[in-house]
Amino acid sequence: MPRNAGITDEMIIKMYKSGVSFKEMNSIIGLSDSGIRNVIYKHGVKMNREQSSGQPRKYRVNEDFFKIWTHEMAWVLGIILTDGTISKQTHTITITQKDERILHLIADYLEANWNISAIYPTRKTPTLIINSKEIKMDLEKFGIIPNKSLTVPFPNIPEKFLPSFIRGVIDGDGWVQDRGYVMNVTTGSIKFAEGLLSVFKSWNLRTEITSDNRFSKNTIYRVWVKGKYDLPKLAKIIYNTTEDNYVFYKKERMEKHSI
């Protein structure tokens, strides 16, 4: 039985590690149980007896996490919106970050198993895997859906939690110049770009949107904050936390010209 088009070994292993049963994987992947096992054995992944027998693997996660606003929830939401991937076929959410410490923090907040995916030749960046139908449905309410990159809106965030959300957005897909003069967030969604621009304007920051379609058929938008006085001002707003839930070097660069 041949596997379905576009299904890679990496995708099979990700589904297996996220707790998808063999019965579910059969229809998605197109392989028999033995075919799936062969892929798993080939990559040296430890088998789970319950899962291979067709029973779902036990998976712990706080499924109410995105139902109640907290600063931690807003921060994680910002990261998932910019740096997360929602599966079409399964109830899997993956978050990719070069800073693995950030993934462990997110797992702690979600009270989830530390299912940090191993690095394969096709993936050089650590990835956190969350498997929950309830969380996937809650994220959909914020417009975070499969293939969201071109259409995701700027969510309706309570003002109290907006700084934490923006910090998550910058941690997920923000770039801060090492000299501390400019910062930008890249997105394929004009709706999100305009929403982010509006927030920066409301904080009286020097901001603008630029667009670029030289390297892709889709337009890429960059929302900028510019100026050695504006970046420290932004830092003062968003780093409103007593915890280390942020990417360290981005904070350091933003505060480079603090008085």
Image (cartoon, rainbow, N blue to C red):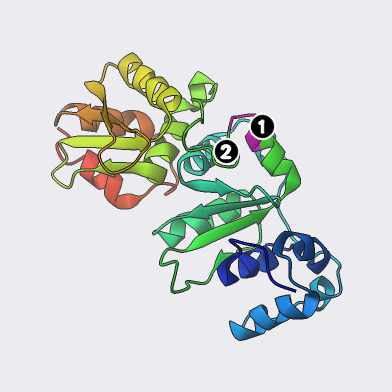
Asked whether 147 falls inside the magenta stretch, the response is no
Residue 210's place in the image compared with 201, above or below, is below
Residue at 42% of width from left, 38% of height from top?
169
Q: Which element is circle 1 on?
A: loop
Callout 2: SS? helix
Q: Is residue 53 left or right of residue 134?
A: right
Q: Residue at x 24, y 28 (%)?
A: 225
Q: Residues within 10 Å of mark 2 (few under 14, many from 20)?
A: many
Quadrant that contains the N terminus: bottom right
Residue 58 shows up from this direction: no
Is 24 left, or right, of 6 in this rendering? right
Residue 235 point in image, percent of width and height: 29, 34
Which stretch appears magenta? 139-143
Chief SS of the magenta region? loop
Q: Earlier in the sequence, mark 2 or mark 1?
A: 1
**Is 151 on the left or on the right of 56, as rendered?**
left
CA–CA distance in space, label 2 to label 1:
8 Å
* Residue in the foreground of this view, choosing between 9 and 159: 9
**Front residue of this view, candidates 234 and 169:** 169
Residue pointed to by mark 2: 73
Q: Quadrant of residue 129?
A: bottom right
Kind of residue sitting beneath label 1: Ile
Label 1 sits on residue: 68
- Quarter occupied by the C terminus: top left
Q: Are marks 2 and 1 in contact (CB under 8 Å)?
A: yes
Position above or below: 202 against 120: above
